[in-house]
Image (tube, helix red, strand yellow):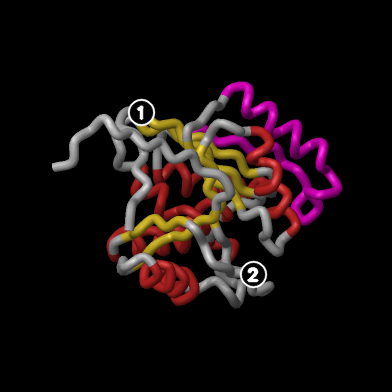
Amino acid sequence: MLGLHLPDGPLDVLCLGAHPDDIEIGCGGTLLRLATRPGLRLTTMVLTGTSDRVAESTAALEEILPAVKTHFPGLLDGRLPDHWNAVKDALEGLARECRPGLVLAPRTDDAHQDHRLVGTLVPTVWRDALVLHYEIPKWDGDVSAPTHYVPLDDTTARAKVDLLNRSFPSQHAHDWWDDELFLGLMRVRGMECRSRYAEAYHTHKVLVDLDLTQECS
């Protein structure tokens, strides 16, 4: 199986979520891996969230990468489709100052309307970036077949779960919030790509650069 390798050197990464904890649940392990990369520049935007939830997400993201730039427009949770123009304006405003090479965002077919809107709008705003759409497990049962995987070792997978539990005490009362759910999905995705654990992504357009100038060794 051929792997998709990010270019060497500094990398600008943008993560987008509809709610606080979306990014950490959907791609927290990937971010923990990227955080070890020299020259990483990370920007995030979470469209909704009360002050206490915003504080939780900010702390989690800063623990992953202290120099992260965070944006919280404060739109209404559960009603983003009714505020299409505000969501589009927030994304377009961010695009004027953030031109990433890699964008991580919710799936375009996510069963939650807030996730789905953000995921659908992202490729219309950042047309020249590699956009990978992460998955969020939920009651609706919308998990589907991914196209791309990021392998995670045991230590990174466990660090992601510990970060979630430590950073989001407001979510502990939910019946779906437990280590088995987070580790279980990562274990299934790991099995699918011959790794112990993994996070999975969906994408609709990837440019394949066939550089034939390098000799095989």
Q: Which residue is mark 1?
A: 10
- Asked whether residue 101 is drawn in magenta, I would say no
Packing grade of label 2 (10 A; few <14, some 14-19, many >=20) is some
Q: Which residue is mark 2?
A: 142
Secondary structure at numbered mark 2:
loop
Give the answer, above or below, for where 159 lies relative to 103.
Answer: below
Secondary structure at numbered mark 1:
loop
Q: Residue at x 58, y 49 (%)?
A: 204
Q: Position of residue 32 (x, y in %)?
A: 37, 49
Q: Position of residue 5 (x, y in %)?
A: 34, 43
Q: Residue at x 54, y 27 (%)?
A: 99
- Asked whether residue 83 is drawn in magenta, I would say yes
The residue stretch that appears in magenta = 69-97
Out of 144 and 24, give the one closest to the viewer.
Answer: 144
**Amino acid marked by disc 1:** Pro
Q: Residue at x 75, y 57 (%)?
A: 113
